[in-house]
Image (spheres, rainbow, N blue to C red):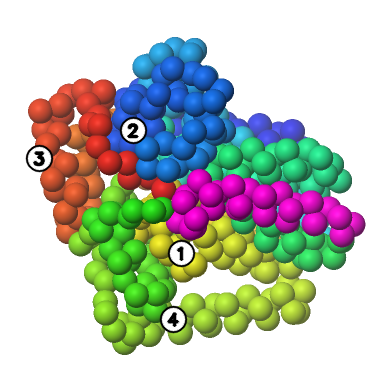
């Protein structure tokens, strides 16, 4: 299969699996970030660079919403179409980046291709793609991957521009500083020192700006207890519980059968003692130890799987700072690329020994994930379907139960979104 055929297949798979999300309406946070956002509905350059009422500063994301609005107004189809295309672009960019990073690894191109296929169809991405308001995840990931790709191709100015746009899509893109160093270490091909200095300098300038916008702090100023109970925990207990929640992400990546748009108060059991987190902490330390061993022994592909996963989750997993949500499937969008790479590496051991069996296994996995994704897309049809399936998936969520009751009157309409406190972070 030629390179062009692989890219074409990746685009086709990424788009086809989300085709049934295109007729969906506006849901949930779309009210705050799109329908009732002055920066979107009354476009002005100055308005795009003003933080929202909850202090979210993402000009690139808001500009993309404004362009959608200017093109077709309050019609959700165009917004969903852009999200699907952004996802397809991220899939191709992931393949291209990994193709370079794994060029010295046996069967590196096939591993990169399998990784991108898995990434294209994984059901955990449905929130990032099917939720219009979650476009910040798609833009930040796609632009970060674009920055990485042009960095690897020795285009430093283009890399800085893409990195800047990624930062202005969502602050979590700052992880590019770590990923670019990890990638060049894995390849054993370092760039000139000023290249890394310029990337770090841009990240530093952005963080200073972000600090000022957030009122002299990192993280949201006021985190609702219902959204993230961990924000009210002492630092030690917050981190211990974050270890347990980190493994919940792993469980959903391995077996994404039960998915929810909401994991707020009472959806996840939290503990005030270290004993309940001990197993999760020990397991995490063991995985990190294996990852460090892989780095020291130049197992570059395995090292990159861990670097992408750990690096991308670092700023959103409530370890460093409390975030606006205790857990969110959309937050796993870029980190899941590391998981998909790990699965592809394990799969490659089979395909090397028994090629036909290996490709058959990948086909079965792809089919299963694709079907689950297409089923999950339907949950985002309107607020009622979203809230109702959320209660079914996580019956303990206090907010989901309340939202089902309040949305029954608009069960048939995809436009039924309320002007309430935003959820995304």
Q: Quadrant of the N terminus?
A: top right
What residue sits 38% from the left and 83% below the top? 279
Q: How far apart are the two marked residues, 2 and 1, measured between alpha carbons?
A: 24 Å
Sequence-first disc among 4 and 3: 4
Q: Can you tell which mark lies on residue 405?
A: 3
The residue beneath circle 1 is 321
Left or right position of 47 against 38: right
Sequence-first disc among 4 and 1: 4
335 or 158, nearer to the observer: 158
Q: Can you tell which mark lies on residue 281?
A: 4
Q: How many marks?
A: 4
Q: Classify mark 1: helix, strand or loop.
A: loop
Q: Can you tell which mark lies on residue 32?
A: 2
Q: Classify mark 4: helix, strand or loop.
A: helix
Sequence-first disc among 2 and 4: 2
Q: Classify mark 3: helix, strand or loop.
A: helix
**10 Å crowding of disc 2: few (<14), some (14-19), many (20+):** many
Q: Which residues are magenta?
A: 192-219
**10 Å crowding of disc 1: few (<14), some (14-19), many (20+):** some
Which tag is nearer the camera, tag 3 or tag 2? 2
Q: Position of residue 252 (x, y in %)?
A: 39, 59
The answer to whether 189 is drawn above or below residue 259 in the figure is: below
Sequence-first disc among 3 and 2: 2
Q: Position of residue 357 (x, y in %)?
A: 58, 57
């Amino acid at each position: 299969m030629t390179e062009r055929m692989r890219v074409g297949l990746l685009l086709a798979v990424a788009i086809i699996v989300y085709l049934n999300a295109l007729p969906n309406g506006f849901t949930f946070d779309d009210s705050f970030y799109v329908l009732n956002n002055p920066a979107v509905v009354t476009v002005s350059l100055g308005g795009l660079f003003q933080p929202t009422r909850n202090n979210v500063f993402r000009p690139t994301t808001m500009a993309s919403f404004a362009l959608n609005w200017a093109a077709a107004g309050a019609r959700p189809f165009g917004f969903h179409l852009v999200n699907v295309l952004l996802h397809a672009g991220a899939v191709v960019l992931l393949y291209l980046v990994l193709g370079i990073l794994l060029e010295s690894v046996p069967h590196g191109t096939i591993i990169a291709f399998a990784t991108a296929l898995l990434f294209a169809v994984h059901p955990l991405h449905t929130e990032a793609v099917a939720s219009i308001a979650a476009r910040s995840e798609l833009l930040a990931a796609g632009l970060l991957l674009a920055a990485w790709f042009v960095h690897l191709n020795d285009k430093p100015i283009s890399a800085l521009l893409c990195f800047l746009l990624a930062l202005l899509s969502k602050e979590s893109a700052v992880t590019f500083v770590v990923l670019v160093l990890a990638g060049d270490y894995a390849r054993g091909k370092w760039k000139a020192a000023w290249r890394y200095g310029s990337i770090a300098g841009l990240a530093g300038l952005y963080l200073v700006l972000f600090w000022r916008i957030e009122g002299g702090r990192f993280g949201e100023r006021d985190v609702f207890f219902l959204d993230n109970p961990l924000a009210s925990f002492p630092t030690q207990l917050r981190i211990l519980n974050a270890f347990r929640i980190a493994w919940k992400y792993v469980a959903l990546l391995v077996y994404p059968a039960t998915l929810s748009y909401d994991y707020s108060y009472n959806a996840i059991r939290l503990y005030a003692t270290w004993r309940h987190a001990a197993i999760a902490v020990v397991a995490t330390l063991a995985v990190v130890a294996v990852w460090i061993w892989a780095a020291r022994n130049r197992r570059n592909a395995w090292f990159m799987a861990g670097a992408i996963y750990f690096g991308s989750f670092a700023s959103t997993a409530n370890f460093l700072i409390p975030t606006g949500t205790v857990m969110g499937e959309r937050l796993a969008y870029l980190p899941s690329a590391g998981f998909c790479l790990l699965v592809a590496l394990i799969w490659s051991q089979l395909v090397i020994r028994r090629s036909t069996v290996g490709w058959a296994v990948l086909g079965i996995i792809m089919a299963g994930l694709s079907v689950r994704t297409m089923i999950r897309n339907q949950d985002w049809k309107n607020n009622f379907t979203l809230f109702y399936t959320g209660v079914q998936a996580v019956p303990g969520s206090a907010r989901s139960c309340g939202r089902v009751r309040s949305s029954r009157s608009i069960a048939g309409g995809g436009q039924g979104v309320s002007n309430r406190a935003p959820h995304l972070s």
